[in-house]
Amino acid sequence: MLTADKVLVTVGTPCSISAVGSTETYRARVSNAPEFIALAAFDAGLVDIDPQADGSLKLRWVNGESTTVAEIERLHGKQLRASLGIRYIDELTALGNSVVTDVAACLPHDFDRGGLRKLAGLTYRDVRDSALKDMYGLFDDDPRLGPSLQAQLFAYSGLGALAALPVSLSELIPNPYEFRVAGATAFPGLDSHGQLRPAGTVTPENDKLRDKFAMRLANSLSSHGPALLSTMLAPSYSISKALKHPELLDSLRSASGYMRVPQTPLNAVGACASSSIVFSEFAPQMVLDYPGYQRPQLVLWTAADAATRPNWQILDAFGPGALMTRGKPEAINAGRSPAEQRSIADSLAPFDIDANGTVVGEGGSGLVITTLDFALRNFLDITSIIVGWGQSGEAGGKAHFAGVGFGGENALIHALELAYRGHGYGVSDFQYLVAHATGTRTNSKTDLTTAANARNAAAERQGIKGALPTMAVGTPKAVGDGHTMGETGLKAVSQALQFLLGKPTVGVPTLRHLDPDLGAVAESFKLQSAPVMGNADGGALCATQGFGGYNGAMALRAAHAEAFARYSPDRNVLAAYLERWPELRREREQRERSARLRRRSAIDLAQLHCWKGLD
């Protein structure tokens, strides 16, 4: 059995943002909570929210006047719902047949037009007036010079994940070199590419853009989002200041000889499996023993995609066959009673006979990863134990380079093998599958077939005879997020954590009539529209597939005292941790909720957690 320093755990829950909204809004949508519309109004900048000790929410219009859920619903409910989730895009609808579809799950409200920067507190003035003022130049309010929308997603979700920590990063890890950011994306920041100008277009009026070439270049790189996170958290000075005062750089020296800067951001691009693949790359680094090797003690795992920007071109690349279009639900609804008709909001229907296309979404997520030993010694709230991971590159069943087909079992078999040999968990110890579930009938079949084949192969390797227990299935895409591309694997882990914390999590909410083409493979799974009840002593699997044969998988188990004891941690350390754990969890939940329902929380968290140089 592994020892505690070789076991990876999650700390807190992911900070996410997607077409449905921010983390709290999304969770309310999953559970059909009555405060959903108030949380959507917060995302839209209409109200401010004060979480109360009893769990209730005190609501105020931005002018300070109190309000209620009912009043928000009456005044803004219809418009708020129209500007989130899977929806028709008016700009595309106006173009008629010249576009392949006018359906997308892009970011809600005004997030693409400065709203996300305002929510995060990452406008020029916010940064200029903060402890990070030396890097204010990176946050120009001109959209051609400021951080791309994709970089904003990385910053908001990555910094938001740090709310799980009870103390600053500098207290947890005095030497920043033991910290690393890992970022994943399927696409470069396409919105930034749209701001690049052809030669010969410079005029005296816009020559400012030429003077800021470094920002324009950086913002156009797919690596900019993770690098921006690392830069905001590192002890740093502007180049001009360091040139004039080189003694400032002495503050970067440490007694060990390593400079006090984080390790380089780890970036991965692996189609829709990007976030799962980047985990498979940094996870071994966190447990590797090699003479002289400095493994990261804590990793900020992030993923983001703003795929539809700037001009929706990526939709054309998918084509109408793979995408949900306006005509498809219209054809499905023809002849159906009003109660049986599908709205565009619930048109993404994996595992259903109505599964006729995917919907491109946008989103970002961030989560803190460390070892069990580090978390116990530093009193971090452990929300799951990561017992396996895997990646593979099969393209079986695919007639061409793109597409999602059969043959991706290796990633999941690998994850289950690590769970069994390293942690003693068999294939039957995992009851919940967060499926890739893009919303096409082909992927519905490949999704379940691949998972079933992997479970059967693992069972054979483990000497298990007979039928395996059925697994419940969930998918965030069917809630209204759409397909968030490279971020989707990390969003799947978000759902898995809710299950392992014993809370209701997403099922397949758009499921009405099971697709008969799934055949016998569906008998291995429990497919339901209602939320899946959590299991605080359970296990969850996350499997992702991507164009080009990219596949990734993760296996997680619930965190509790008996599970920790399997890894022989220091008895005194474990006893001290368990005594404080209920308090740690309450405080972590309060910190996360407070941060996620507070404007400018990202800049506040950056100031708290960045390593300082000389004052």
Image (cartoon, rainbow, N blue to C red):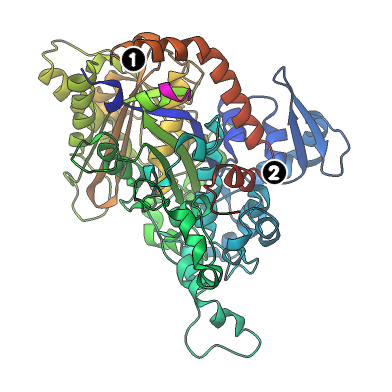
The residue under the point 49% across, 46% down is 364
Left or right side of 4 for 512: right
- Judge by depth and name the residue closer to the eye, 370 or 592: 370
Q: Is the magenta stretch mostly helix, strand or loop?
A: loop
Quadrant occupied by the N terminus:
top left
Q: Give the range drawn in magenta.
A: 376-380
Mark 1 or mark 2, which has the lower sequence index? 1
Is 211 left or right of 388, judged from the image as shown? right
Numbered badge on residue 601: none
Could you tell me if residue 356 is visible in this image? Answer: yes
- Residue beneath the point at 54% across and 49% down: 612
Closer to us: 413 or 609: 609
Task: Give the answer, above or below, for where 440 lies relative to 34.
Answer: below
The reply to whether dot 1 and dot 2 touch (C-beta < 8 Å) is no
For residue 610, side relative to residue 467 (left or right): right
Q: Residue at x 54, y 19 (%)?
A: 585
Give amino acid for label 1.
Asp
Direction from residue 500 to residue 103 in the image, left or right: right
Residue 118, how many percent across, how many down? 68, 52
Residue with the mark numbered 2: 599
- Residue 570's tag is 1
**Residue 59's x, y, as percent?**
79, 32
Q: Does the magenta stretch include residue 229?
A: no
The kind of residue tagged 2 is Arg
Q: How many marks?
A: 2
Give whichever of 445, 327 is nearer the camera: 445
Q: Which image quadrant is residue 526 in?
A: top left
Q: Considering the numbered disc 2 on the image, is that residue within a helix, a strand or a loop?
A: loop
| Mark 2: few/some/many CA within 10 Å (<14, 14-19, 20+) | many
Q: In this view, does 449 lie above or below 299?
A: above
The image position of residue 203, as x and y in percent, is 60, 90
